[in-house]
Each structure stands twice: as C-alpha cells, then as structure tokens.
Amino acid sequence: MPEPIRTQELPAGLLTHPEMVRACRLRDFAVVFRLVKTRAGIYPSMIARRCDLTPSRVGEVMSGRRRLLHMDVVERIADGLRIPGHMLGLARREWETPAGLRDTDGDIKPPRPSPRPTSVPQAVPPPPVAVPGSDVDSILALTSRADPNPSTLHALRSSIEDYWRRDDQHGGEALRPAVVGQLRYVVGLLREHRPAPIRQGLYGVAAELARLTGWTYFDARQYNQARSYFAEALQFAREIDDREFMANVLACMSLQATYQDRPADALAFVTAAQDEARAADGTTPRVLSMLSMREAFAHATLGSRTATHAAIAEAHRHFERVGSSDPDPAWVTYFDETKLIVDTGIAHGRLGEAQTAVPLIAEALRRESRTNQRGRAFHAFWLARTQLSTGNLDEACRTATDALRPASSVASERVTWHLREFYDELAPYRREPVALAFESRLRDLFPGQVSATRRP
C-alpha cells in the first residue's frame, strides 16, 4: 500500500468536536469526510489520495450511496487523515507514538487504547488549537534527558491519588487522556537503564496507571478495553513481583465479570486474587476483607446463598482485625467500614434478600461522603431498586429522585445503567403520582434519557 500523504494534520479542535467524535465512533465516514472538508480544508480529491481511495468512491461515501466497512479501508483512513486509532475502534497507530518512544526490541510495549465510551459529552466545541505535529514530538523526545529520582516517583504517585479523587467526584472520562499520557511517559522512562529502586518504582507507577485507565473504561462499560488495560497492569506488577497489587487488579476483573453476567469468570478471578494475596508477604486484613467481599459478589451472582453468606462472614472477620497502624497499600484505603456495610447490603440484594439489604445500604448512604458523587448515586440506585423489589414504591422513588442530582454531575455509564435498570423496573407503576414525579425530575436533569431508557 502506498505511504499515506501527510502534508496536513487535522486541527485539534476538529478531533475533539462532539460531531466528529460520534461520527468516528459509528464509522460514519460520510460525516467524517464532510467535517474534514469543511473544517480542515481537505477536499475529496485529497482525501482520496491520502486514503488510497478513488475520488468517485469518496464521492459515493459523502453522498450516502456507499459505506466503508472493510477493516483495511478503515485503517487507511485513520493513517491517511491522521485520525487516532482509538477514535475509530482501532489499535493505537504506529505514527501516534513519537519515534524516540517506539518499541523496537520488544522489551516494553505501550498500552493500546481502544474505542471511546459510547456516551459523548455534550459540550461547546473548543476553538482550534495549534499543537505540535508528531515529528516535533519525535525530535523533542530525542533531546529529552529525563532522570527520574525518588521525588519523581512521589510526584507521580501523588498525581494518581488526585486522579482517583477526581474520578470519584466527576467520573474518569475526562481524566483518561491525561492518565494514558502519563502512562506512556512512564513506559518511555522504563525503556532506559535505571537503578533498580527507581526501575521498580516506575513499574509500580505504570501498574497503577494502567489499572486506573482500565477502571475508567470499566466505569464507562467499555469492557474489552478495560480488560486489556487490567492485563497490562498485571504484567507491570508481575515484573516487580507485587503480588498484592496483582490481587487488586484481579479483584477489579472479578467485579467487571459480575457486570458482564459471567459469574464463573468472576469467581475464577477472585480466587486467583486470593491466591496471590496469600502468597504475598504481609497482606493486610483490609486487603483480605475486600477480596472476601468480591468473592461474595461472585457467589451471589451465581445464586449460591450458602457460599455468599460464608464469604460475607469472612470479610467481616478480616475487617475486625484491621488496625490503624496496618501498612495498607494506598489503593485499598477506600475500603472502610462504610464500604464494607454497603457491599454487604449489595451482596444480600444480589441474592434477593431485600429485607436484609435495605437497612445496610441505607445506613451506608447516610455515612457516605458527599464528595463521592458517583458512589452516592451508584449506591442510591441500588437502594431504590432493592426497595422497589419489596413493593415500597414511595420510598424507592424518593431514593431514586435523590440519586439523580449526584448522578447528573458524574460521567459514569455504570451509574447511568443502574438508572436505566430502575426506570425499566418502574414500568408497572408509571401512572402512579410518585413515579410521575420521579420521571419529571429525570427529564429535568437528564434531557432525552427517558426516551433512551424505554425498551421495545
């Protein structure tokens, strides 16, 4: 195939424009080509040359008479127009990585971002911004003399903690580009020879950044992408034999499997996580408690009442041993008593034990920090669905109405999914005044969401 012509980069404002993002996600090349023409001044004849297409074929696409579906054509368009691979559901394109950071010896490969989540935030299109081309990045990479030290590692870990806080408050969609960029930076640092303590620290940071990226995709219900990043995190952690962190990643994969309705996979992952934790030196009671609760989720999804109750009891036994001086890793500190209570309630709710679940989830909501917008929305919808299952329509609608405000302030498809589930389960009661009031509030805070939740 001829080398794509690269005489003009697409403006950054075009690549971030919501209409362009949506068209790329749907591979609607009629819209893509139109936007490239009107906003970047790249006319159909040049599109054809860049993408190794005939002008007549480009014209047919733009007029809606032909669709481009073959993967090799999609790849030619990505390379010819310089559209990042993840926007079209492709692996990261070679030209996206500056030459100075490309993998040439198979030692370390940078993660490959996958498609963006299906929901596109509605925002005012940003003005075009002049950004350096990839050739400039390559030149600057060659002149870089990064010399990471303990302060570098501390700064990177502090930024990860900040990312997690903002993820709780606003969701991870807007954070993902920064997290992935920092991950690439750390991978680049690992390509050079480093003293053993620094190299070990960089591998740990890379593992945390890869897990965080996987989590943002999981929260967006983009499961294939999430799993690839979780696997990347496992590889980084394995390089430094951090078995506790491997257990953490496997626990994330177990939780994702419960969302995918793959309870056998969920149980396999959490069992492997517990094996890794037992093999690690000094695994803390808090970590073991969290893993036992993930096991409870897996058993509950399988419908195994006895095994679920046993895992819940084990989680509480471990938590009773938690001490203030325990050397807990930073990534497990979120698992406090409030989280233990709400997860216990959710596990009972998954089993259909609503009478046990409702007071537990309600108590956790009463305690939960109001800065954790996603957690509050997520747990409130769990509570509303559980209340509805007991026939308590008024309480369920009040709880769900209270959840709409935090849900509207966070970009989380996982939360939106729970909202849809509650709305579907509300169908038999739609004419009741309290249900009509909830739907009115839903329309105010989520324009268009009501119609989107209705299923044939």
Image: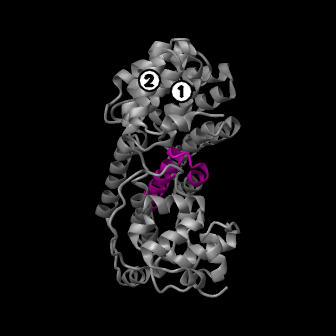
Q: Quadrant of residue 27?
A: bottom right
Residue 45 percent location from the top left of the image: 57, 84
Position of the C terminus by quadrant:
top right
Q: Quadrant of residue 65?
A: bottom right
Q: Earlier in the sequence, mark 2 or mark 1?
A: 1
Residue 132 percent location from the top left of the image: 36, 78
Q: Residues within 10 Å of mark 1 (few under 14, many from 20)?
A: many
The answer to whether residue 206 is magenta is yes
The answer to whether residue 270 is magenta is no
Residue type at tag 1: Phe
Q: Residue at x 55, y 45 (%)?
A: 221
Q: In the image, is residue 222 above or below residue 91?
A: above
Task: State how far apart marks 2 and 1 are (Cα).
Answer: 11 Å
User: Which residues, given as a range, are shown in magenta?
Assistant: 203-227
Q: Which residue is mark 1?
A: 422
Nearer to us in this view, 226 or 281: 226
Q: Answer yes or no: do the residues labelled 2 and 1 have beta carbons within 8 Å?
A: no
Q: Main secondary structure of the magenta part?
A: helix
Residue type at tag 2: Phe
Q: Which residue is mark 2?
A: 438
Nearer to us in this view, 319 or 116: 116
